[in-house]
Amino acid sequence: MKFEDFEIDETEDFAAMLEESFKKSESKSDLVTGTIVKIDENDNLAVVDIGGGRDANLNLDEIKDEEGNVTFNVGDEISVVTMGRGRISHTAAQARVALNEFIAEYDEEQEYIIEGIITKTNKGGYVVEVDGLEFFMPRTLSYLSSKIDPKGKKVKAVIVKVDKDKGSVVVSRKELIERDKAKTDEIVGKLLENKEPVIGTIKKITSYGMFVDVGGMDGLVHYSQISHKGPVNPSKYFVEGDEVNVIALEYDKKKRHLSLSIKDANPDPWADIDAIIGVGDTVTATVSNIEPYGVFVDLGEDLEAFLHVSEISWDKNVKHPKDYLENNSDINVEVIEIDKEGRRLRVSLKNLLPKPMDAFVAENRVGDVVTGTVTSITDFGAFVKVGTVEGLLHNQEISWDKSQNAKSELKVADEVEVKIIKIDRDAGKISLSKKALEASPVKAFAETHKNGAIVTGTVKDKKDFGVFISLEDNVDALIRTEDLHPIKFDEIEKGQEIKGVISFIDGNTDRIRVSVKRLERQEEREAMDQLNLDQDDSMTLGDAFGDILKK
């Protein structure tokens, strides 16, 4: 619609109202030529002789220029319209004269469409002012509701009647609206019937879509109907005045709302996606939108892909994609996923970049001692950046003192010297150790203690599979559940001393196992050995005395 949307009121009888208006016009106003007989600036009025021995007062404001100077003198003739009750108007007279001139030049063979402001209302209709001319618009030809005061409204109408004798011009807004409706119905009918793409011109862009002119009618392309990519911001792709191909979707006659689609007027790339792109392909894309969690890139062919923040760089500490990419920049990416059902594409930028792990492996080996910088600290350890890669320094590898951990011993940005203890090239993981650079307490303990040595330790912890005891500072041993006999597992408490025999010790792996059961057996064996020794000694003495007695 190109007119204001007012409620239509057609309850009035046009002929009767128009005749009533003409009668009132003839009886209440008349165009005459008078003579100014007095100018009184104090009272801001002029006295005008309008003939027949009658004088009338004219407001001086009607005959002053922009600087406030009176443009007439006493004795000057002046055209006025008598308004009744001794009132006259020069302005109305000028409008009447102009209207009469317009009527005189009116060509009945030509159509006149006017656009003016409603300045007055009466029972019969409205007065529409156009460049100083006043036209009458009957209520039944206005398409305006009597419930709304339209004064001050701009309206468009067509001249439907000119009465030269009465000096009146009648206009109709209804005529133009009905023409527009008929034209709209014709356009919509063709669009919905053919369902073929047509060229439209973008008239206005909003946050929710675009208004497009198709053959003189405006339709809305919702932002979800612009691209096969999904909902998009129209202002990023179009400007007002652009021509676009559209298809009509539906028309709401009650609301007179035409819905259009740009995406349905163009081929759907997902219908033949396999022929367009494949996993592993390297393509050039344009950065279209940057979010904290990743980047949307335009692949062309009305396709959009998502570049997750984790796929931007091999650096795991990417804080925000905008630190690496800019909107509207072109980048090469690798297609890593095509979800046909979800109509989603995922791409990777880092896959096309040199892998830092490859460079690291080329220069470093397990056992090398390197210096790195702490980048982050977690509950389980610290990540240390060595060159361009990060390795994990687990809490267990911080110190031989098991009470120490990453949170208690390190801070972000600390420089630490560590030993590489494992490299998993395929998984891209590196394990580091700080304690490996220090002497192992277990290794030192193993130099003075061997298998079979009897030791005493203090219970530190209980697990389902056994008990950990402390033998010395930072030297712990495990007693398996089956090696506790004759001690009962349920009766053991932390801090309790337990005596046992070393059953396994390895200074290289820092592992010691102790057995109570073996201690019991060992003590039994030693007692038996001692008993046997004692028995052997007593028999030898008896035998000796026996031999003597025999002699």
Image (spheres, helix red, strand yellow):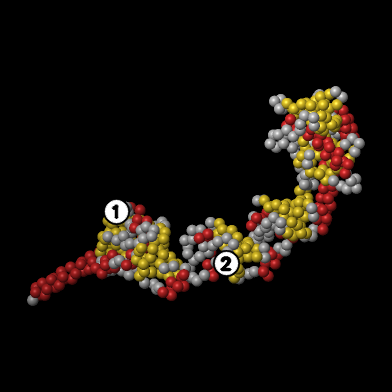
Q: Residue at x 50, y 71 (%)?
A: 354
Q: Quadrant of residue 154?
A: top right
Instruction: Report the side of 455 relative to 354 (left or right).
Output: left
- The amino acid marked with disc number 1 is Gly
User: Between 32 and 453, which is closer to the camera in this rendering?
Assistant: 32
Q: Residue at x 24, y 68 (%)?
A: 448
Q: Quadrant of residue 172?
A: top right
206, above or below 533, in the image: above
User: Between 452 and 549, which is closer to the camera in this rendering?
Assistant: 452
User: Between 496 and 191, which is closer to the camera in this rendering?
Assistant: 191
CA–CA distance in space, label 2 to label 1: 64 Å
Q: Residue at x 74, y 34 (%)?
A: 71
Whether residue 468 is visible: no
Q: Circle 1 is placed at which residue position? A: 495
Q: Secondary structure at mark 2?
A: strand
Tell me whether the residue at label 2 lies in contact with that at label 1, contact meaning CB atoms closer than 8 angstroms.
no
* Image position, residue 490 (x, y; %): 35, 53
Q: Quadrant of the C terminus?
A: bottom left
* Nearest to viewer (mark 2 / mark 1): 2
* Image position, residue 100 (x, y; %): 86, 38
* Image position, residue 388 (x, y; %): 44, 67
Q: Residue at x 35, y 62 (%)?
A: 398
